[in-house]
Amino acid sequence: MSLTYEIIWHGRGGQGAVTAAKIFTEAAYLQGFKGVSAKPTYFSERRGAPVSVHARISVDPIRTFSNVSTADLAVVLDDNLLQMVNVTSSLKAGGLLVINSSRTPDQLGLNGSFSVAVSDAFRSSEQAGLIVEGNVLISTSILGPIVAASDLVDIENVKKAIEHKFRGKALERNLMALELAFRETRISNHSILAKTASA
Amino acid sequence: MSDVRIITANSAAALAAKLCRVQVVSAYPITPQTPVTEELAELVESGELKAEYLTVESEHSAMASVVAASQVGARVFTASSANGLLYMHEMLHWAAGSRTPVVMACVNRGVGAPWTILNDQQDSISQRDTGWIQLYCKNSQEVIDSIIQAYKIAEQVNIPVMVCYDGFILSHTTTPVEIPSQQLVDSYLPPRPPVIGISEYTHMNVNPLILSDPRPDVDGKMAPGYMDIRYRLQQDLLSCLDVIKLADRDFHELFGRTCGGVCWGYKMTDAAHAIVSFGSLASECTLAADLLRQRGLRVGVLGVRSYRPFPKDDLVKALEAVETVTIFEKDVSYGYEGALAMDLKSALYESANHPRFSSYVAGLGGRDVLPETLADEAYRAITGEVKHAWINIKN
Protein backbone atom coordinates (compact mmCIF):
# COMPACT_ATOMS: atom_id res chain seq x y z
CA MET A 1 0.00 0.00 0.00
CA SER A 2 2.98 2.33 0.54
CA LEU A 3 3.46 2.70 -3.20
CA THR A 4 -0.04 4.08 -3.64
CA TYR A 5 -0.61 7.83 -3.69
CA GLU A 6 -4.07 8.93 -2.64
CA ILE A 7 -5.50 12.16 -3.97
CA ILE A 8 -8.62 14.15 -3.14
CA TRP A 9 -9.86 16.81 -5.52
CA HIS A 10 -12.19 19.53 -4.23
CA GLY A 11 -14.06 21.71 -6.64
CA ARG A 12 -17.43 23.12 -7.48
CA GLY A 13 -19.85 21.48 -9.89
CA GLY A 14 -19.07 22.61 -13.43
CA GLN A 15 -15.56 23.79 -12.59
CA GLY A 16 -13.72 20.85 -14.07
CA ALA A 17 -12.53 18.83 -11.05
CA VAL A 18 -13.72 15.55 -12.60
CA THR A 19 -12.07 16.32 -15.95
CA ALA A 20 -8.87 17.46 -14.23
CA ALA A 21 -8.73 14.27 -12.15
CA LYS A 22 -9.29 12.12 -15.23
CA ILE A 23 -6.55 13.86 -17.21
CA PHE A 24 -4.15 13.59 -14.27
CA THR A 25 -4.80 9.85 -13.76
CA GLU A 26 -4.24 9.25 -17.46
CA ALA A 27 -0.97 11.19 -17.25
CA ALA A 28 0.01 9.06 -14.25
CA TYR A 29 -0.69 5.92 -16.27
CA LEU A 30 1.52 7.24 -19.07
CA GLN A 31 4.15 7.91 -16.41
CA GLY A 32 4.21 4.18 -15.63
CA PHE A 33 1.82 3.85 -12.69
CA LYS A 34 -0.04 0.61 -13.49
CA GLY A 35 -2.94 1.35 -11.20
CA VAL A 36 -4.83 4.61 -11.52
CA SER A 37 -8.39 5.48 -10.58
CA ALA A 38 -10.57 8.55 -10.27
CA LYS A 39 -13.94 8.22 -8.57
CA PRO A 40 -16.16 11.29 -8.52
CA THR A 41 -18.54 11.56 -5.57
CA TYR A 42 -22.08 11.96 -6.75
CA PHE A 43 -25.50 12.80 -5.47
CA SER A 44 -25.83 16.47 -4.83
CA GLU A 45 -23.69 17.48 -7.78
CA ARG A 46 -24.91 20.55 -9.60
CA ARG A 47 -23.33 23.76 -10.80
CA GLY A 48 -21.63 25.57 -7.94
CA ALA A 49 -22.08 22.88 -5.28
CA PRO A 50 -18.95 21.41 -3.68
CA VAL A 51 -17.88 18.19 -5.44
CA SER A 52 -14.96 15.91 -4.82
CA VAL A 53 -13.06 13.19 -6.65
CA HIS A 54 -11.25 10.36 -4.87
CA ALA A 55 -8.26 9.23 -6.89
CA ARG A 56 -5.35 6.86 -6.54
CA ILE A 57 -2.17 6.31 -8.48
CA SER A 58 -0.20 3.19 -7.69
CA VAL A 59 2.62 1.05 -9.00
CA ASP A 60 0.23 -1.94 -8.72
CA PRO A 61 -3.26 -2.32 -10.20
CA ILE A 62 -5.95 -0.69 -8.04
CA ARG A 63 -8.06 -3.10 -5.98
CA THR A 64 -9.88 -0.63 -3.74
CA PHE A 65 -12.62 1.72 -4.87
CA SER A 66 -13.47 3.12 -1.45
CA ASN A 67 -13.16 6.77 -0.53
CA VAL A 68 -9.76 8.25 0.25
CA SER A 69 -9.70 9.04 3.97
CA THR A 70 -6.23 10.59 4.22
CA ALA A 71 -4.66 12.02 1.10
CA ASP A 72 -1.05 12.45 0.01
CA LEU A 73 -2.23 15.20 -2.27
CA ALA A 74 -5.27 17.45 -1.98
CA VAL A 75 -6.21 19.74 -4.84
CA VAL A 76 -8.56 22.67 -4.29
CA LEU A 77 -10.00 24.33 -7.38
CA ASP A 78 -11.65 27.20 -5.49
CA ASP A 79 -10.00 28.76 -2.44
CA ASN A 80 -13.41 29.67 -0.98
CA LEU A 81 -13.92 25.95 -0.42
CA LEU A 82 -11.21 26.10 2.26
CA GLN A 83 -13.82 27.78 4.48
CA MET A 84 -16.46 25.14 3.74
CA VAL A 85 -14.53 21.88 3.59
CA ASN A 86 -11.93 20.86 6.13
CA VAL A 87 -9.34 20.00 3.50
CA THR A 88 -6.28 19.92 5.72
CA SER A 89 -7.72 17.47 8.27
CA SER A 90 -7.68 14.73 5.63
CA LEU A 91 -4.16 15.49 4.45
CA LYS A 92 -1.31 13.19 5.47
CA ALA A 93 1.68 14.60 7.33
CA GLY A 94 4.23 15.54 4.67
CA GLY A 95 1.47 15.78 2.07
CA LEU A 96 0.92 18.42 -0.55
CA LEU A 97 -1.94 20.89 -0.79
CA VAL A 98 -2.46 22.49 -4.20
CA ILE A 99 -4.77 25.49 -4.43
CA ASN A 100 -6.10 27.62 -7.24
CA SER A 101 -5.91 31.09 -5.74
CA SER A 102 -4.83 34.62 -6.52
CA ARG A 103 -3.43 34.84 -3.01
CA THR A 104 -0.01 33.66 -1.81
CA PRO A 105 0.47 30.61 0.43
CA ASP A 106 1.14 32.96 3.38
CA GLN A 107 -1.99 35.01 2.73
CA LEU A 108 -4.07 31.84 2.76
CA GLY A 109 -2.84 31.27 6.32
CA LEU A 110 -2.60 27.51 6.13
CA ASN A 111 -0.35 25.94 8.71
CA GLY A 112 0.50 22.30 9.21
CA SER A 113 2.99 19.60 8.38
CA PHE A 114 2.34 19.80 4.67
CA SER A 115 3.56 21.77 1.66
CA VAL A 116 1.34 24.29 -0.06
CA ALA A 117 1.49 25.11 -3.76
CA VAL A 118 -0.59 27.96 -5.09
CA SER A 119 -1.19 29.10 -8.63
CA ASP A 120 -3.78 31.41 -10.10
CA ALA A 121 -5.14 28.76 -12.45
CA PHE A 122 -8.17 30.91 -13.15
CA ARG A 123 -6.00 33.76 -14.47
CA SER A 124 -3.81 31.36 -16.46
CA SER A 125 -6.87 29.91 -18.18
CA GLU A 126 -8.27 33.37 -18.77
CA GLN A 127 -4.99 34.48 -20.37
CA ALA A 128 -4.96 31.35 -22.53
CA GLY A 129 -8.47 32.15 -23.74
CA LEU A 130 -10.06 29.10 -22.13
CA ILE A 131 -13.49 30.66 -21.83
CA VAL A 132 -16.62 28.82 -22.95
CA GLU A 133 -19.99 30.55 -22.67
CA GLY A 134 -18.56 32.96 -20.11
CA ASN A 135 -17.08 30.19 -17.94
CA VAL A 136 -13.33 30.07 -17.38
CA LEU A 137 -12.25 26.43 -17.54
CA ILE A 138 -9.47 25.43 -15.18
CA SER A 139 -9.41 21.65 -15.55
CA THR A 140 -6.00 21.73 -17.25
CA SER A 141 -4.41 24.83 -15.67
CA ILE A 142 -4.93 23.36 -12.17
CA LEU A 143 -2.56 20.55 -13.20
CA GLY A 144 0.26 23.12 -13.57
CA PRO A 145 0.91 23.64 -9.85
CA ILE A 146 0.60 19.88 -9.17
CA VAL A 147 3.37 19.14 -11.65
CA ALA A 148 5.45 22.09 -10.40
CA ALA A 149 5.27 21.09 -6.72
CA SER A 150 5.46 17.29 -6.93
CA ASP A 151 7.56 14.80 -8.78
CA LEU A 152 4.78 12.29 -9.46
CA VAL A 153 4.11 12.98 -13.11
CA ASP A 154 6.25 14.75 -15.73
CA ILE A 155 4.71 17.69 -17.55
CA GLU A 156 5.27 15.85 -20.87
CA ASN A 157 2.90 13.09 -19.78
CA VAL A 158 0.31 15.64 -18.64
CA LYS A 159 0.57 17.25 -22.09
CA LYS A 160 0.14 13.86 -23.77
CA ALA A 161 -2.99 13.18 -21.70
CA ILE A 162 -4.35 16.61 -22.65
CA GLU A 163 -3.59 15.85 -26.32
CA HIS A 164 -5.79 12.75 -26.02
CA LYS A 165 -8.69 14.90 -24.96
CA PHE A 166 -8.56 18.07 -27.04
CA ARG A 167 -7.95 19.03 -30.67
CA GLY A 168 -6.99 22.15 -32.60
CA LYS A 169 -7.46 25.55 -30.96
CA ALA A 170 -8.86 24.02 -27.76
CA LEU A 171 -5.74 21.91 -27.41
CA GLU A 172 -3.43 24.90 -27.90
CA ARG A 173 -5.30 26.90 -25.26
CA ASN A 174 -5.29 24.05 -22.75
CA LEU A 175 -1.57 23.46 -23.17
CA MET A 176 -0.89 27.19 -22.80
CA ALA A 177 -3.03 27.38 -19.64
CA LEU A 178 -1.10 24.44 -18.17
CA GLU A 179 2.23 26.06 -18.97
CA LEU A 180 1.23 29.44 -17.52
CA ALA A 181 -0.12 27.97 -14.29
CA PHE A 182 2.98 25.76 -13.99
CA ARG A 183 5.29 28.78 -14.22
CA GLU A 184 3.22 30.90 -11.81
CA THR A 185 3.29 28.30 -9.04
CA ARG A 186 4.37 29.53 -5.60
CA ILE A 187 5.41 26.86 -3.13
CA SER A 188 5.88 27.02 0.64
CA ASN A 189 7.42 24.42 2.98
CA HIS A 190 8.51 22.45 -0.03
CA SER A 191 9.05 18.71 0.34
CA ILE A 192 8.80 16.84 -2.94
CA LEU A 193 6.55 13.78 -3.23
CA ALA A 194 8.85 11.07 -4.51
CA LYS A 195 8.22 9.58 -7.91
CA THR A 196 8.36 5.80 -7.90
CA ALA A 197 6.55 4.61 -11.00
CA SER A 198 9.52 4.72 -13.34
CA ALA A 199 12.15 4.05 -10.66
CA MET B 1 0.50 -3.36 -28.91
CA SER B 2 -2.34 -3.44 -26.44
CA ASP B 3 -4.92 -0.69 -26.48
CA VAL B 4 -5.32 0.45 -22.88
CA ARG B 5 -7.72 3.30 -22.23
CA ILE B 6 -8.45 5.13 -18.98
CA ILE B 7 -12.23 4.84 -18.99
CA THR B 8 -15.26 4.17 -16.80
CA ALA B 9 -17.02 0.80 -16.58
CA ASN B 10 -19.95 2.39 -18.41
CA SER B 11 -17.69 3.22 -21.36
CA ALA B 12 -16.29 -0.31 -21.17
CA ALA B 13 -19.83 -1.73 -21.36
CA ALA B 14 -20.76 0.41 -24.38
CA LEU B 15 -17.50 -0.53 -26.12
CA ALA B 16 -18.14 -4.21 -25.40
CA ALA B 17 -21.56 -4.04 -27.04
CA LYS B 18 -19.99 -2.35 -30.06
CA LEU B 19 -17.21 -4.96 -30.28
CA CYS B 20 -19.87 -7.69 -30.17
CA ARG B 21 -21.55 -6.05 -33.18
CA VAL B 22 -24.96 -5.88 -31.52
CA GLN B 23 -27.73 -5.31 -34.03
CA VAL B 24 -30.50 -3.90 -31.85
CA VAL B 25 -30.08 -1.70 -28.79
CA SER B 26 -33.03 -0.57 -26.74
CA ALA B 27 -32.65 1.13 -23.41
CA TYR B 28 -34.26 3.70 -21.18
CA PRO B 29 -31.84 5.98 -19.32
CA ILE B 30 -31.54 5.74 -15.54
CA THR B 31 -28.70 6.80 -13.25
CA PRO B 32 -26.04 5.33 -13.05
CA GLN B 33 -26.60 3.40 -16.30
CA THR B 34 -27.28 6.54 -18.40
CA PRO B 35 -23.77 7.00 -19.91
CA VAL B 36 -24.03 3.48 -21.42
CA THR B 37 -27.14 4.49 -23.36
CA GLU B 38 -25.61 7.85 -24.33
CA GLU B 39 -22.40 6.34 -25.65
CA LEU B 40 -24.24 3.64 -27.60
CA ALA B 41 -26.60 6.23 -29.07
CA GLU B 42 -23.58 8.25 -30.21
CA LEU B 43 -21.94 5.18 -31.75
CA VAL B 44 -25.12 4.36 -33.68
CA GLU B 45 -25.60 8.00 -34.70
CA SER B 46 -22.03 8.29 -36.01
CA GLY B 47 -22.38 5.05 -37.94
CA GLU B 48 -19.53 3.37 -36.02
CA LEU B 49 -22.02 0.82 -34.76
CA LYS B 50 -24.41 -0.46 -37.38
CA ALA B 51 -27.35 -1.16 -35.14
CA GLU B 52 -30.94 -0.15 -34.71
CA TYR B 53 -31.29 2.03 -31.61
CA LEU B 54 -34.84 1.95 -30.32
CA THR B 55 -35.81 4.84 -28.08
CA VAL B 56 -38.61 3.62 -25.89
CA GLU B 57 -40.87 5.07 -23.25
CA SER B 58 -39.93 2.73 -20.41
CA GLU B 59 -37.71 -0.08 -19.23
CA HIS B 60 -40.60 -2.49 -19.65
CA SER B 61 -40.72 -1.58 -23.35
CA ALA B 62 -36.94 -1.68 -23.64
CA MET B 63 -36.89 -5.30 -22.50
CA ALA B 64 -40.00 -6.18 -24.53
CA SER B 65 -38.41 -4.80 -27.70
CA VAL B 66 -35.05 -6.54 -27.30
CA VAL B 67 -36.87 -9.81 -26.54
CA ALA B 68 -38.86 -9.39 -29.76
CA ALA B 69 -35.74 -8.54 -31.79
CA SER B 70 -33.90 -11.47 -30.25
CA GLN B 71 -36.72 -13.83 -31.15
CA VAL B 72 -36.26 -13.04 -34.84
CA GLY B 73 -32.52 -13.61 -34.63
CA ALA B 74 -30.89 -10.26 -33.80
CA ARG B 75 -28.03 -9.87 -31.35
CA VAL B 76 -29.43 -7.42 -28.81
CA PHE B 77 -28.24 -5.32 -25.89
CA THR B 78 -29.85 -3.29 -23.14
CA ALA B 79 -28.89 -1.88 -19.78
CA SER B 80 -30.64 -0.69 -16.64
CA SER B 81 -30.36 -0.04 -12.92
CA ALA B 82 -32.42 -0.18 -9.75
CA ASN B 83 -36.05 0.88 -10.15
CA GLY B 84 -35.69 0.73 -13.94
CA LEU B 85 -34.63 -2.90 -13.68
CA LEU B 86 -37.56 -3.61 -11.39
CA TYR B 87 -39.88 -2.06 -13.95
CA MET B 88 -38.56 -4.69 -16.39
CA HIS B 89 -39.33 -7.48 -13.96
CA GLU B 90 -42.21 -9.04 -15.91
CA MET B 91 -40.25 -8.97 -19.16
CA LEU B 92 -37.17 -10.44 -17.47
CA HIS B 93 -39.22 -13.55 -16.76
CA TRP B 94 -40.44 -13.44 -20.35
CA ALA B 95 -36.91 -13.15 -21.78
CA ALA B 96 -35.76 -16.24 -19.88
CA GLY B 97 -38.98 -18.21 -20.35
CA SER B 98 -38.95 -17.65 -24.11
CA ARG B 99 -35.25 -18.58 -24.19
CA THR B 100 -33.93 -15.43 -25.84
CA PRO B 101 -30.15 -14.81 -25.65
CA VAL B 102 -30.55 -11.20 -24.51
CA VAL B 103 -27.49 -9.63 -22.85
CA MET B 104 -27.96 -6.72 -20.50
CA ALA B 105 -25.75 -4.65 -18.25
CA CYS B 106 -27.13 -4.11 -14.78
CA VAL B 107 -25.37 -1.13 -13.24
CA ASN B 108 -26.05 -1.96 -9.61
CA ARG B 109 -27.86 0.68 -7.59
CA GLY B 110 -29.89 0.66 -4.40
CA VAL B 111 -33.66 0.50 -4.68
CA GLY B 112 -36.04 3.19 -3.38
CA ALA B 113 -37.69 4.02 -1.03
CA PRO B 114 -35.98 6.01 0.34
CA TRP B 115 -34.53 7.27 -2.92
CA THR B 116 -30.92 6.55 -3.56
CA ILE B 117 -28.98 6.73 -6.78
CA LEU B 118 -25.95 5.16 -5.15
CA ASN B 119 -24.67 1.62 -5.17
CA ASP B 120 -25.70 -1.66 -3.69
CA GLN B 121 -26.81 -4.92 -5.28
CA GLN B 122 -30.39 -5.14 -4.11
CA ASP B 123 -31.65 -4.49 -7.65
CA SER B 124 -30.10 -7.47 -9.44
CA ILE B 125 -30.39 -9.77 -6.43
CA SER B 126 -34.13 -9.11 -6.35
CA GLN B 127 -34.24 -10.42 -9.97
CA ARG B 128 -32.50 -13.63 -8.94
CA ASP B 129 -35.42 -15.94 -9.65
CA THR B 130 -36.27 -14.71 -13.14
CA GLY B 131 -34.26 -17.47 -14.84
CA TRP B 132 -31.42 -15.23 -16.02
CA ILE B 133 -27.74 -16.01 -15.79
CA GLN B 134 -26.14 -13.39 -13.51
CA LEU B 135 -22.42 -12.59 -13.71
CA TYR B 136 -20.83 -10.14 -11.23
CA CYS B 137 -17.75 -8.06 -12.14
CA LYS B 138 -15.03 -7.06 -9.68
CA ASN B 139 -13.51 -4.34 -11.88
CA SER B 140 -14.01 -2.54 -15.18
CA GLN B 141 -11.80 -4.92 -17.14
CA GLU B 142 -14.17 -7.71 -16.18
CA VAL B 143 -17.09 -5.62 -17.44
CA ILE B 144 -15.82 -5.49 -21.02
CA ASP B 145 -14.57 -9.09 -20.91
CA SER B 146 -17.75 -10.45 -19.30
CA ILE B 147 -20.10 -8.79 -21.79
CA ILE B 148 -18.15 -10.34 -24.67
CA GLN B 149 -18.28 -13.72 -22.90
CA ALA B 150 -21.97 -13.21 -22.12
CA TYR B 151 -22.95 -13.38 -25.80
CA LYS B 152 -20.89 -16.53 -26.22
CA ILE B 153 -22.75 -18.11 -23.29
CA ALA B 154 -26.24 -16.77 -24.04
CA GLU B 155 -26.26 -17.77 -27.70
CA GLN B 156 -25.07 -21.26 -26.90
CA VAL B 157 -27.71 -22.06 -24.28
CA ASN B 158 -30.46 -19.61 -25.30
CA ILE B 159 -30.68 -18.10 -21.85
CA PRO B 160 -30.34 -14.35 -21.20
CA VAL B 161 -27.34 -13.01 -19.28
CA MET B 162 -27.24 -10.08 -16.89
CA VAL B 163 -23.73 -8.65 -16.43
CA CYS B 164 -23.76 -6.82 -13.10
CA TYR B 165 -21.30 -4.13 -12.01
CA ASP B 166 -21.38 -1.60 -9.20
CA GLY B 167 -22.90 1.80 -9.90
CA PHE B 168 -20.53 4.79 -9.47
CA ILE B 169 -17.90 2.62 -7.75
CA LEU B 170 -17.14 1.12 -11.17
CA SER B 171 -19.62 2.77 -13.53
CA HIS B 172 -18.27 6.31 -13.07
CA THR B 173 -14.71 5.57 -11.92
CA THR B 174 -11.97 5.82 -14.52
CA THR B 175 -9.37 3.04 -14.48
CA PRO B 176 -7.14 1.45 -17.13
CA VAL B 177 -9.09 -0.99 -19.32
CA GLU B 178 -7.52 -3.05 -22.07
CA ILE B 179 -9.73 -2.94 -25.17
CA PRO B 180 -9.71 -6.17 -27.18
CA SER B 181 -9.21 -5.79 -30.92
CA GLN B 182 -12.25 -6.14 -33.18
CA GLN B 183 -10.47 -8.91 -35.07
CA LEU B 184 -9.99 -11.03 -31.94
CA VAL B 185 -13.55 -10.43 -30.75
CA ASP B 186 -14.83 -11.48 -34.18
CA SER B 187 -12.91 -14.73 -34.02
CA TYR B 188 -14.10 -15.38 -30.44
CA LEU B 189 -17.69 -14.44 -31.15
CA PRO B 190 -18.96 -15.33 -34.63
CA PRO B 191 -22.32 -13.92 -35.75
CA ARG B 192 -25.28 -15.27 -33.84
CA PRO B 193 -26.40 -18.67 -35.16
CA PRO B 194 -29.62 -18.31 -37.16
CA VAL B 195 -32.86 -19.02 -35.37
CA ILE B 196 -34.08 -22.34 -36.73
CA GLY B 197 -37.72 -22.19 -35.87
CA ILE B 198 -40.22 -21.15 -33.32
CA SER B 199 -42.17 -23.84 -31.55
CA GLU B 200 -42.38 -25.64 -28.24
CA TYR B 201 -39.88 -28.21 -29.55
CA THR B 202 -37.15 -25.58 -29.96
CA HIS B 203 -36.00 -23.34 -27.19
CA MET B 204 -38.06 -20.42 -28.37
CA ASN B 205 -41.35 -20.47 -26.57
CA VAL B 206 -42.77 -17.34 -28.09
CA ASN B 207 -46.36 -17.46 -27.13
CA PRO B 208 -47.90 -20.85 -27.63
CA LEU B 209 -50.83 -21.62 -25.40
CA ILE B 210 -49.43 -24.04 -22.91
CA LEU B 211 -51.49 -26.30 -20.71
CA SER B 212 -50.31 -27.93 -17.55
CA ASP B 213 -50.03 -31.36 -19.11
CA PRO B 214 -48.66 -32.44 -22.52
CA ARG B 215 -51.33 -32.32 -25.19
CA PRO B 216 -51.47 -32.92 -28.95
CA ASP B 217 -50.82 -29.83 -31.05
CA VAL B 218 -52.51 -28.99 -34.37
CA ASP B 219 -50.30 -31.55 -36.17
CA GLY B 220 -51.28 -34.21 -33.70
CA LYS B 221 -47.80 -34.29 -32.09
CA MET B 222 -47.52 -34.25 -28.34
CA ALA B 223 -46.45 -30.82 -27.07
CA PRO B 224 -44.88 -30.34 -23.64
CA GLY B 225 -46.72 -28.70 -20.79
CA TYR B 226 -45.68 -25.55 -18.95
CA MET B 227 -43.79 -27.46 -16.29
CA ASP B 228 -41.85 -29.50 -18.86
CA ILE B 229 -40.68 -26.35 -20.63
CA ARG B 230 -39.70 -24.75 -17.31
CA TYR B 231 -37.87 -27.96 -16.31
CA ARG B 232 -35.72 -27.64 -19.47
CA LEU B 233 -34.82 -24.08 -18.48
CA GLN B 234 -33.77 -25.26 -15.03
CA GLN B 235 -31.74 -28.18 -16.42
CA ASP B 236 -30.05 -25.95 -18.99
CA LEU B 237 -29.23 -23.32 -16.37
CA LEU B 238 -27.64 -25.91 -14.08
CA SER B 239 -25.59 -27.45 -16.88
CA CYS B 240 -24.49 -24.11 -18.27
CA LEU B 241 -21.99 -23.70 -15.42
CA ASP B 242 -19.68 -25.67 -17.72
CA VAL B 243 -20.53 -23.39 -20.63
CA ILE B 244 -19.59 -20.35 -18.50
CA LYS B 245 -16.28 -21.97 -17.55
CA LEU B 246 -15.53 -22.88 -21.15
CA ALA B 247 -16.40 -19.40 -22.42
CA ASP B 248 -13.89 -17.96 -19.95
CA ARG B 249 -11.25 -20.58 -20.81
CA ASP B 250 -11.59 -19.88 -24.54
CA PHE B 251 -11.45 -16.16 -23.79
CA HIS B 252 -8.26 -16.65 -21.78
CA GLU B 253 -6.62 -18.54 -24.64
CA LEU B 254 -7.38 -15.80 -27.10
CA PHE B 255 -7.06 -12.64 -25.01
CA GLY B 256 -4.76 -13.72 -22.18
CA ARG B 257 -7.17 -12.66 -19.45
CA THR B 258 -9.56 -14.64 -17.27
CA CYS B 259 -12.52 -13.62 -15.13
CA GLY B 260 -12.19 -16.85 -13.14
CA GLY B 261 -14.98 -18.84 -14.80
CA VAL B 262 -17.75 -19.28 -12.23
CA CYS B 263 -15.70 -18.18 -9.21
CA TRP B 264 -12.18 -16.98 -8.40
CA GLY B 265 -9.82 -17.28 -5.47
CA TYR B 266 -7.31 -14.89 -3.95
CA LYS B 267 -4.67 -16.44 -1.66
CA MET B 268 -7.02 -19.39 -1.12
CA THR B 269 -4.37 -22.13 -1.55
CA ASP B 270 -3.27 -22.16 2.10
CA ALA B 271 -6.24 -20.26 3.54
CA ALA B 272 -7.68 -21.33 6.88
CA HIS B 273 -10.27 -18.57 6.69
CA ALA B 274 -12.27 -17.53 3.64
CA ILE B 275 -13.94 -14.23 2.93
CA VAL B 276 -16.65 -14.73 0.31
CA SER B 277 -18.13 -11.86 -1.67
CA PHE B 278 -19.01 -10.65 -5.15
CA GLY B 279 -18.78 -7.54 -7.30
CA SER B 280 -16.29 -4.79 -6.50
CA LEU B 281 -16.73 -5.55 -2.80
CA ALA B 282 -14.88 -8.83 -3.42
CA SER B 283 -11.96 -6.81 -4.83
CA GLU B 284 -12.06 -4.67 -1.68
CA CYS B 285 -11.97 -7.89 0.37
CA THR B 286 -8.62 -8.89 -1.19
CA LEU B 287 -7.04 -5.89 0.55
CA ALA B 288 -8.74 -6.93 3.80
CA ALA B 289 -7.21 -10.39 3.36
CA ASP B 290 -3.76 -8.81 2.95
CA LEU B 291 -4.29 -6.81 6.16
CA LEU B 292 -5.42 -9.93 8.06
CA ARG B 293 -2.40 -11.90 6.83
CA GLN B 294 -0.24 -9.14 8.34
CA ARG B 295 -2.01 -9.95 11.62
CA GLY B 296 -0.96 -13.59 11.23
CA LEU B 297 -4.24 -15.07 10.00
CA ARG B 298 -4.21 -17.20 6.85
CA VAL B 299 -7.07 -15.49 5.04
CA GLY B 300 -8.12 -15.81 1.40
CA VAL B 301 -10.96 -14.47 -0.70
CA LEU B 302 -13.42 -16.47 -2.75
CA GLY B 303 -15.19 -14.31 -5.33
CA VAL B 304 -18.48 -15.49 -6.78
CA ARG B 305 -18.72 -14.51 -10.45
CA SER B 306 -21.68 -16.60 -11.53
CA TYR B 307 -24.42 -16.09 -8.97
CA ARG B 308 -27.09 -17.74 -11.13
CA PRO B 309 -26.49 -20.50 -11.96
CA PHE B 310 -25.02 -20.94 -8.49
CA PRO B 311 -21.69 -22.82 -8.66
CA LYS B 312 -22.42 -24.91 -5.57
CA ASP B 313 -19.87 -27.66 -6.18
CA ASP B 314 -17.05 -25.28 -7.08
CA LEU B 315 -17.66 -23.16 -3.99
CA VAL B 316 -17.92 -26.16 -1.66
CA LYS B 317 -14.68 -27.54 -3.09
CA ALA B 318 -12.90 -24.19 -2.71
CA LEU B 319 -14.01 -24.10 0.94
CA GLU B 320 -13.31 -27.76 1.81
CA ALA B 321 -10.29 -26.97 4.00
CA VAL B 322 -11.26 -23.69 5.68
CA GLU B 323 -12.21 -23.28 9.34
CA THR B 324 -14.32 -20.17 8.92
CA VAL B 325 -16.33 -18.46 6.21
CA THR B 326 -17.13 -14.75 6.38
CA ILE B 327 -19.48 -13.23 3.82
CA PHE B 328 -19.72 -9.59 2.85
CA GLU B 329 -22.52 -8.57 0.53
CA LYS B 330 -24.47 -5.49 -0.52
CA ASP B 331 -27.96 -6.96 -0.45
CA VAL B 332 -30.34 -8.54 2.01
CA SER B 333 -33.42 -10.69 1.95
CA TYR B 334 -35.42 -8.53 4.35
CA GLY B 335 -36.55 -10.53 7.31
CA TYR B 336 -33.68 -12.99 7.03
CA GLU B 337 -30.08 -12.59 5.81
CA GLY B 338 -28.05 -11.72 2.73
CA ALA B 339 -28.82 -13.73 -0.41
CA LEU B 340 -25.30 -15.05 -0.90
CA ALA B 341 -25.08 -16.07 2.76
CA MET B 342 -28.28 -18.10 2.51
CA ASP B 343 -27.24 -19.82 -0.72
CA LEU B 344 -23.74 -20.65 0.43
CA LYS B 345 -24.91 -21.95 3.80
CA SER B 346 -27.36 -24.24 2.06
CA ALA B 347 -24.61 -25.44 -0.30
CA LEU B 348 -22.32 -26.22 2.64
CA TYR B 349 -25.01 -28.37 4.27
CA GLU B 350 -24.10 -31.13 1.83
CA SER B 351 -20.38 -30.64 2.39
CA ALA B 352 -18.25 -32.84 4.65
CA ASN B 353 -16.68 -29.64 5.97
CA HIS B 354 -18.88 -27.33 8.03
CA PRO B 355 -16.86 -24.15 8.61
CA ARG B 356 -18.01 -21.64 11.21
CA PHE B 357 -20.11 -19.16 9.27
CA SER B 358 -20.63 -15.41 9.61
CA SER B 359 -22.29 -12.99 7.26
CA TYR B 360 -22.33 -9.23 6.95
CA VAL B 361 -24.45 -6.79 5.03
CA ALA B 362 -22.36 -3.79 3.95
CA GLY B 363 -22.45 -0.69 1.81
CA LEU B 364 -26.17 -0.31 1.18
CA GLY B 365 -27.17 2.86 -0.70
CA GLY B 366 -23.59 3.87 -1.39
CA ARG B 367 -22.27 3.77 2.18
CA ASP B 368 -18.51 3.65 1.83
CA VAL B 369 -16.75 0.41 2.78
CA LEU B 370 -13.05 0.59 3.62
CA PRO B 371 -10.73 -2.43 3.41
CA GLU B 372 -9.68 -1.67 7.02
CA THR B 373 -13.30 -1.98 8.17
CA LEU B 374 -13.73 -5.26 6.30
CA ALA B 375 -10.52 -6.54 7.91
CA ASP B 376 -11.66 -5.54 11.41
CA GLU B 377 -15.09 -7.11 10.96
CA ALA B 378 -13.67 -10.30 9.42
CA TYR B 379 -11.22 -10.48 12.34
CA ARG B 380 -14.16 -10.36 14.77
CA ALA B 381 -15.93 -13.07 12.79
CA ILE B 382 -12.85 -15.30 12.61
CA THR B 383 -11.93 -14.97 16.27
CA GLY B 384 -15.31 -14.39 17.85
CA GLU B 385 -18.94 -15.25 17.65
CA VAL B 386 -20.47 -13.05 14.97
CA LYS B 387 -23.32 -14.75 13.15
CA HIS B 388 -25.03 -12.05 11.16
CA ALA B 389 -24.55 -8.28 11.31
CA TRP B 390 -24.74 -5.07 9.35
CA ILE B 391 -21.59 -2.96 9.30
CA ASN B 392 -21.12 0.81 9.38
CA ILE B 393 -24.56 1.48 10.86
CA LYS B 394 -24.39 5.10 12.04
CA ASN B 395 -27.52 5.76 14.05
Image: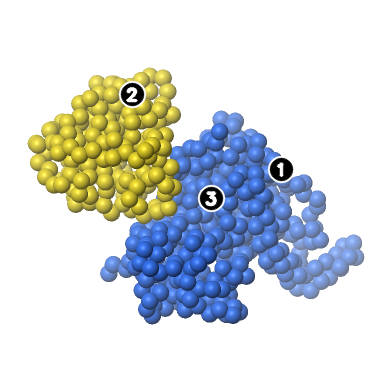
Name the residue rendered at 45%, 39% in the picture: B6
Q: CA distance from mark 2 to mark 3?
A: 34 Å
Name the residue rendered at 28%, 40% in the picture: A194
Label for residue B190?
Answer: 1
Q: Position of residue B354 (x, y in %)?
A: 53, 80
Q: Colour of chain B?
A: blue
* Of callouts 3 and 1, the N-terminal one: 3
SS under mark 1: loop
In this rendering, would B144 be left or right of A6? Answer: right
Tell me how the rendering is colored.
Answer: by chain
Name the residue rendered at 61%, 39% in the picture: B19
Q: Nearer the viewer, residue B120 or B242?
A: B242
| Dot 3 and dot 1 within a common chain | yes
Task: Identify the residue under disc 2.
Answer: A175
Inspect this view and state whether residue A195 appears: yes
Q: Colour of chain A?
A: yellow
Q: Nearer the viewer, residue B66 or A149?
A: A149
SS under mark 2: helix
